[in-house]
Image (spheres, helix red, strand yellow):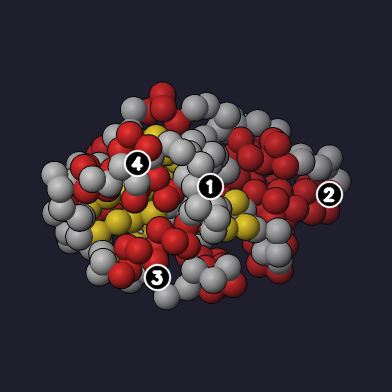
Amino acid sequence: MSLLRELFNGELPRLVMFDLDGTLVDSVPDLAAAVDKTLLALGLPAAGIEQVRNWVGNGARVLVRRALAGGLEHAHVDDAQAEQALELFMQHYAANHALTQVYAGVKPTLDWLREQQVELAIVTNKPERFVAPLLDEKGLGGYFRWIVGGDTLPQQKPDPAALRLARVEPTQALFVGDSLNDVRAAKAAGVPCVALSYGYNHGRPIAEEHPAQVLDCLSGLLRPAANALLPGLAG
């Protein structure tokens, strides 16, 4: 029995919801490039990929504030400077997604779920304006019935509001993510959560958040539970 069926007592869920950055795609190279161009335009030193990787996960506004602060804590950042930086960042990020890559195992898993008529959704803290174009550009457009961005609702993850939009019973839905925001949103919504080990979680192992399962590849959902952590299919 596959891990996915084991999570739902031998059945398939009606809905599988996915985070985007760090779960389906590795977007940090493009995010870091946009952050660095923004910082340089403001006369500040570039941050680099490794720092940006630890700052991603709470939406563009928080990412920019962390970049200005040079760390996760950003309460002291000037609001006017942050707004200026956010506008620059949005311009730079919109211009190029060439470095973003789809993770291994993603497309085969999405294909299988679609063949089984499982509804699919994206719930991300990325601004909504970027989500559908990025999915289309990376060959992931058309899979998802619902797309919820970080500015679609007044709340964003870890608030559970977005996970409830589809009006599917929590026991019939699954959330797949990579960060503490994903696991905490799912738990607050009463939805089982599977987490990916390779994503962005501010430098901390995602297992510390105690999701239902931690996988090294998305295709582990389709394998027997005992083999779920084996290396995945090529995406």
Check the image and report above or below for 57 versus 121.
above
- Residue carrying label 1: 22
- Residue carrying label 4: 194
- Asked if the residue at tag 3 contacts the one at tag 4, i.e. Cβ–Cβ closer than 8 Å, the answer is no
- Asked if the residue at tag 1 contacts the one at tag 3, i.e. Cβ–Cβ closer than 8 Å, the answer is no
- Residue carrying label 3: 143
Instruction: Determine which quarter of the picture holds residue 51.
Output: top right
Q: Is residue 160 visible?
A: no
Q: Position of residue 54 (x, y in %)?
A: 61, 35
Q: Position of residue 216 (x, y in %)?
A: 48, 39
Q: Position of residue 14 (x, y in %)?
A: 20, 60
Q: Which of marks 1 and 3 precedes in the sequence? A: 1
Mark 1 or 2: in front is: 1
Q: Amino acid at mark 1?
A: Gly
Q: Amino acid at mark 2?
A: Leu
**In front here: 144 or 181?**
144
Q: Secondary structure at mark 2?
A: helix
Instruction: Determine which quarter of the picture holds residue 120.
Output: bottom left
Q: Amino acid at mark 4?
A: Val
Q: Which of marks 3 and 4 precedes in the sequence? A: 3
Q: Secondary structure at mark 3?
A: loop
How many neighbours does mark 2 have within 10 angstroms: few (below 14), some (14-19), or many (20 or more)? few
Q: Is residue 12 visible?
A: yes
- Residue carrying label 2: 40
How far apart, in angstroms, are the residues tagged by discs 1 and 2? 25 Å
Mark 2 or 3: in front is: 3
Q: Secondary structure at mark 4?
A: strand
Q: Amino acid at mark 3?
A: Tyr
Q: Which of marks 2 and 1 precedes in the sequence? A: 1
Residue name at image x 71 percent, y 64 percent:
98
Mark 4 or 2: in front is: 4
Q: Secondary structure at mark 1?
A: loop
